[in-house]
Amino acid sequence: MSIKKILGTALAVASILGFAASAEAKTTVRISHTQIETHPDHIGFVAFKNFVESKAGDKYDVRIFPNSSLGANEKVLELVKMNSVQFLSVSTANIESFNKKYAVFSVPFLFTSESNFEKFITDPEVLAELGSDAQKDGFRPLGAFTAGTRNFYSKTPINTVDDLKGKKFRVQAGPTNVKMMEAFGAAATPMSFGEVYSALQQGVIDGAENNELALTDQKHGEVCKYFSYDGHQMCPDLIVASEKFLSKLSDEDRKLFEDAAKEAQKAEFEAWHKRIAEAKEQAKKMGVTFIDVDANAFREKVLPLHQQLLNENPAMKAMYEKASAFDASNNK
Ligand code: GCU
């Protein structure tokens, strides 16, 4: 072999090794969520990425995967447990099948105001208590995103609670949601978020329940022209981290990711209130009518369900009592 060839080969090998070394020097941190890129959850995660990379960009490469591109939330939560995905924003309803205490947020009319809900889910003590089984669960909530209030929307107007009777509504996963719809006198069809548009279009369901962004971002407003403000649920999207990932970090780096989750939370809340007002206008232009119903009638219909849900799921009792006491004391 000529010297030139030997040198060439050596250089090629060195560059491959060099490349591998520099690729290895950075840890890829994968974040998954189910929303589009203008959604507040995404904006929150951009703040997370910027925070981590501005402090430790030489160590971490943070990649955000929107639109459920890594899979539906319950599937991705399995990947979080395995540390294939490090962070995920996921509705508490989707965590219910992993740990039953998270079902507490699916209890209808748990809070009497959106501001009480917001204060509660951002209380560090609440997050710590939710995460007390993290070693067993394989994931830990580090922050919360608001997802506003959940309301019914449908192809025909829901003016009173009796208008729900006999109709089929898509709900998020979890037995609590199914029981809630039964208590409302309707039928529940649990399915993942990404399947709802075509189910509405094909007439598999009569309506669904969510915040206003489902009408615009997911285009449900193309099919459902009536959105009724009954406010039956407030479920946060939690920023959950892989416990396996967290447990391998130094104290300093663990704090970096905890602080990044707080930054994300702050950015998401700010974006949320602005975006909801815009989305409402956008939906009106799509032809959606917003209906102010007598929310108390909806509330009274399902309040007796609280005790039944608590009897059936004692795992959520402590958090239910904490939330109820918090709500009552903030209403004084
Ligand atoms: C909201 C919430 C999501 C959830 C979705 C749903 O968009 O932010 O986390 O998955 O509702 O109804 O499935």
Image: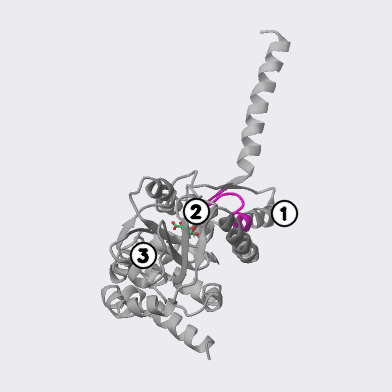
The residue beneath circle 3 is 99
Q: Closer to us: mark 2 or mark 1?
A: 2
Query: Given contact means CB atoms under 8 Å apart, are the residues at marks 3 and 2 in contact?
Result: no
Query: Given contact means CB atoms under 8 Å apart, are the residues at marks 3 and 1 in contact?
Result: no
Q: Nearer the N terminus, badge 2 or badge 1?
A: 1
Count of picture labels: 3
**Range of the magenta residues?**
29-45
Disc number for residue 221: 2
Q: Label 3 vs label 1: CA separation?
A: 35 Å
SS for dot 2: helix
Task: From the top left corner, tell me how far across and down residue 266 is, in percent.
Answer: 64, 66
The residue positioned 45% from the left and 55% from the top of the image is 224
Q: Label 3 vs label 2: CA separation?
A: 33 Å
The quadrant where residue 173 appears: bottom left
Color theme of the render? one colour
| Residue type marked 1 | Ser
Queried on whether the Cβ of the residue with tag 1 lies below 8 angstroms from ligand 1, the answer reads no
The quadrant where residue 146 appears: bottom right
Is 286 rendered above or below residue 289?
above
Query: Given contact means CB atoms under 8 Å apart, are the residues at marks 2 and 1 in contact?
Result: no
